[in-house]
Each structure stands twice: as structure tokens, then as C-alpha cells.
Amino acid sequence: MLPSTKRIDSHVHFYTAQDLHRVAGSLPYTLPEPYPLTAYLDALIDAGIAPTLINNVHLSILPDSENVFASFEELKNLQATNPLRYGGVKLVGTIKAEPAYATSQRLAHPQVMGARIVLHDARPETVSDTQFSDGQWSAFYARLLPHQHLHIYAKEAETNLRVLRQIPRDVRVIIDHLGTCHPERDITEPAYIALLTEARERGNVWFKGPGYRTSVHPEETARFVMQIVCAVGADKLLLEATDAPHVGTDNQGAPYAGRFDPSNAFNFVDAVAQHVSKETRIPVDQLLRGAAGQLAS
């Protein structure tokens, strides 16, 4: 048998039919298919891929992150039943960043590494200057433990920037999807440059892949990655992720699920890293997962 290829997945979503049943009929679009942890692991392991570190990230369509906590128990049971197959997997989670939900008790779970603000395609002008800095949010930031992070997801760089500027400067921050999902605005977009400048000045802001929501073309995504490397540093980059199960569509309306599965997503980030490595001489492994030890320990 050939040796397995070890991978980390810094951004994936696990949820069951029971989780989806809770929001059935409340969404303006068709629900995705369930995406359980066991099926994900089995597909990768059977394909010769050995996941060593996985981050189950809060899924925006769900009202809470109970599915994240359930996945911890699911893996625990798998490892008890078959330690040889599943014993090498470490699972962490990122829960919903809502002050009323992200309580001290939930944040104290040893596998919770952070919390996530989801804004999708919110326009910058819809984010007020105090929306994420009032008393409730300040109390939430104070509850974050030193090793935990706040994740921000917005498709627009300026929206990410408006949120980032409201977060206390001692809070570690991860910007999802490389900070922008608008490749047509290019790496010279003023708001994107401002976001990277703010990240550099703070010194504790990371940018996370996989990057196909920035562009489905590796060479184009690589241009944004190189901008991050030049402005913020390669040590503030974590490319290796799948964002499975690839919900949604690209800017041309093509479903991501028709193009990607976890294996293809890993191939995509490998291609991005290879483009960047060729230009910068930074090792591919460093671009893919060099920051993993800082973000999931």
C-alpha cells in the first residue's frame, strides 16, 4: 500500500440532516445535502489522503454551532471504535461569533479555537462604526482566550476592513477567503490595499485559503496571495483548506460543487502555492500550512 499524503484542512463544514431540518423552509434557496464528518474522513482516507488537522467552521445557515460540538463527539467515537484508521486526526472548531451564543462555557471547550463573524456580500456602508464594538461585543472579545481567534468573512475587502478596525488590537484575527471575493477589482483595489496595511500594522492578522472564492483560476488567486505575502508576510498565510462542501456559486454563477471536491480543492491550493513559490522562492509547504501551528495549537 502506498503511504498516505498528510493534509490539514483549515476550513471545512460538517453538518447532518438533523442540523438542516432545523432551518428547513426558512431559507430562500434549496438546502445543501448533509455533509457529515465520517463520510468526509472516509472519502479522503480511501483516496490515500490522511487528514491530520481539521477545523470545523461555523456554517452561516445554522442558528448556532451545535453541529461543531457534535462533530467533536463524532470523532471521539470513531477513534474509540477504530483508532488505527482515525487516531491520527485532530479536530478543532470555530463557533458562531455572536455575543449571546459565544459564552465563556462554550469558548472554554478545549477544541474551540475561535469564533466567526459571517457577513457574506454585505456592502461596506451597511456596517456601522460601532456594530461590532458595543458593550456586548466588547465583553465577547474579552472572553476569547489568548490562543483563540476571531474569523471574519465578507466578500468585500472594505467590509472586512470596517469590521477589523472595530476589533481590539490584541485580538488575533483570521480573514477568510484571502480578504476578497472580487477578483475583477484586482490586487490594486484601494480597499484591499488598506486591509492589508491594517493587517500589517496590527501584526496579528492572518489570511486563510483555499482561495477559490477569490478566483477559481489558481494563477489569478496566486496574485492575491503574493500581494498578501509582500504586504503582510508569508507567516500570516494559511492556504491549505477545502471549504467543503463547496456551497454556492462563483461570480459567473457556476456552482462550486460542480468543480470541487475535497481532493480537487487540495489540488487547487497546491497549484496556487506552486505559482507563488515559483515567484517568491518561498517553500510550498510554508505557504500551505506554515501558520498552522500558530492558529490551531
Image: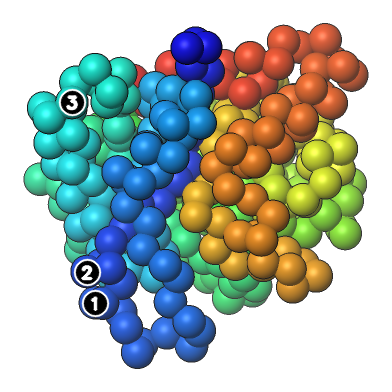
Instruction: Give the left or right position of residue 139, taking residue 1 as reference.
Output: left
Front tag of 1 and 3: 3
Instruction: Give the left or right position of residue 287, taking residue 275 as reference.
Output: left
> Which quadrant holds residue 52?
top left
Can you say whether 201 is above or below 291 in the image?
below
- Name the residue located 25 percent from the left edge and 38 percent from the top edge: 112
- Residue 18 numbered tag: 2
Q: Secondary structure at mark 3?
A: loop
- The residue lying toward the viewer, choosing from 62 and 113, is 62
Spatial CA span between label 2 and label 3: 25 Å
Can you say whether 275 is above or below 224 in the image?
above
- Residue 82 numbered tag: 3
Q: Secondary structure at mark 2?
A: helix
Q: Could you classify mark 2 by the number of other residues whose Cα lies within 10 Å: few (under 14), some (14-19), or many (20 or more)?
A: few
- Residue 22 numbered tag: 1
Three-letter code for the amino acid on which mark 1 is drawn: Arg
Q: Position of residue 59 (x, y in %)?
A: 39, 60
- Name the residue located 28 percent from the left edge and 68 percent from the top edge: 17
Q: Position of residue 76 (x, y in %)?
A: 15, 33
Query: Badges 2 and 3: C-beta atoms under 8 Å apart?
Result: no
Q: Position of residue 210 (x, y in %)?
A: 62, 40
Spatial CA span between label 1 and label 3: 31 Å
Spatial CA span between label 2 and label 1: 7 Å
Name the quarter where the C terminus is drawn. top left
Front tag of 2 and 1: 2
